[in-house]
Image (cartoon, grey):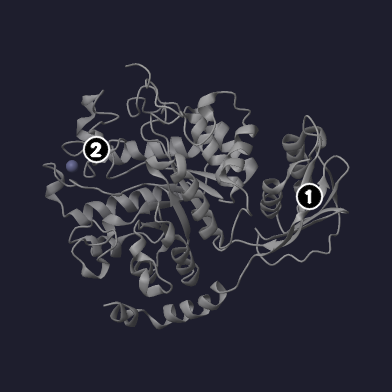
Amino acid sequence: MKAKFVCRLSSVFCLAVALAASAADVKYQDFKWEKDTLVPFGATTTVTLECPDPAAAKWLASHYKEWYGDAAPKVVAGATGLKVDGGDEAYAASTDADGVKIAANTLAGVRWASYTLRQLAIAKRSTFKTDGYLLPKLTTKDRPHLAFRAVHLCCFPETRIQQIERAIRLAALMKFNYAIIEPWGMYKSEKHPWWPWPNAYLTKAEVKRLVAIGKDIGITLIPQVNCYGHASSARGCTIKHCTLDIHPEYEPLYEPGGWCWCISNPETQRVLRELIAEIHEDFGNPPFFHIGCDEAFGAQSCPECVKTPHAELAIRHFNGLAEFLKSRGARAMMWHDMLLEKSDRRWDGFIKFGRKDAPSILDGLSKDIVICDWQYWDKTKGKDGKDWPTISHFAEKGFSVAGCPWTNYKAMMPMANHLVKINGFGFVETTWHHLRGKDWENMYKHGAHAAWGSPVSHDVSFQRSLRLVGNDMKVTDYLDTGYLSNQIPPGWWAH
Ligand SMILES: [Zn+2]
């Protein structure tokens, strides 16, 4: 089956795979350190920065002040003698007794270099309070595997906004450059106040604050609105619905039961466009917008939708949203599962929920849409294209495709390597309701490593990195420390 599939690939695509394969084998990162040779890093240290962007030196100096206070090293622009490989995000750095050198082509590269060093800096020893830092002696040059490296974060009603902020800041420190934010009924729309839960915490002011933080630290926030399935904005296992449980008068916008939007109703398209426009603007009009569209079970079940072929309805709905986003300067992203026919044996062992008409929907889908192929099983691991047939399928059809793992840690690096080989769009680490405890640590560590192509931390604990971002936020609440809110379940002593 797999051999047959490969034979069907066009010769142009095969050539692209062959050319890209040699590039994927290049080891980007060259990290050499003398772990036990420590050099001072403090107010008397000079950091020489070589970067064509004049804003970079200012950014670095202001962040050193934020991170190190009175012990902030001095930043001077100048030649470093370091060689930086091509690419906007590439960087090189060195530390020794004479000081620190950083070279990069853009501010993005400067950020990643500074995060590598920040993770490694420890407080100088033998004092009561911190009075300067120490860095290991090292030289490194680095650039990422994939240009688009995202985490997908869920703002559940049960999630504290501080948790989301820590997750965004930590993702940047671990060198992800995008965060897809799914509001789960927690975006407080002013245009459609009936849509979210009444206690929605993602207000305009809060969204703008998080977006500004992201912009400063190098991570672009991408909003999401589920525009087909998951219209309840609540996990299916709860049978909650953020709108219909409180505002039943909006029933015509949804299929019976409320899990899917009613896509034959023109009011649905109007409402979704208005929500997208409002949210997109609040997020600073980023270049991408996720329209969800996974697990659309029970779609086309109302008396009006059944009058039109499902593929026709779906294509009109998806492409209409994509076209609207294009007019706003953004590309739509959507989950892949309804675009693969469930009974198609070629995808056995992979996630696929589509109806019989899935192939015709895919054929009619706008190529402007980025397909996010979520595959969550370690059994998909492999080293060549044959092991990722769904990703290859979408690429062969001419789509930009992102690979999206979850807690299938062993599959992450092979998936990322395959994406590089086929010149895939990028990598989206999904987290869902597992952004807690050891799962949080493993999703970020393995996901970042795979997306970057090499370690983003060097013998640095997740605990230390998480504490750094909490310190940046100046957290004082017990609940906002560690990777669990409580060490004993609340109410444990009540009975
Ligand atoms: Zn309908």
What is the C-alpha distance between the residues marked 1 and 2? 52 Å
Residue 231 lies, with reference to residue 151, above or below; the image says above
Q: Which residue is mark 2?
A: 237
Task: Point out residue 479 in the picture as x, y percentages from the top left corner.
Answer: 50, 26
Task: Specify the quadrant of the image occupied by residue 364.
Answer: bottom left
* Crowd class of label 1 (few under 14; some 14 to 19; many from 20; radius 10 Å): few
Quadrant of image for the N terminus: bottom left
* Residue 38 visible within the image: yes
Res. 219 in view:
no
171 horizontally vs 202: left or right: right
Residue drawn at point x = 35 percent, y = 47 percent = 292
- Taking the image as shown, residue 34 lies to the left or right of residue 248, namely right
Q: Is mark 1 within 8 Å of ligand 1?
A: no
Q: Is residue 399 above or below residue 63?
A: below
Which quarter of the rendering shows the C terminus?
Answer: top left
Q: Which mark is residue 373?
A: none
User: What residue is disc 1 on?
Assistant: 54
Residue 494 image position (x, y, % from top left)? 35, 16
Q: Position of residue 83 (x, y in %)?
A: 77, 66
In this picture, residue 66 sits left or right of residue 12: right
Which residue is found at the position 41% from the left and 55% from the top?
405
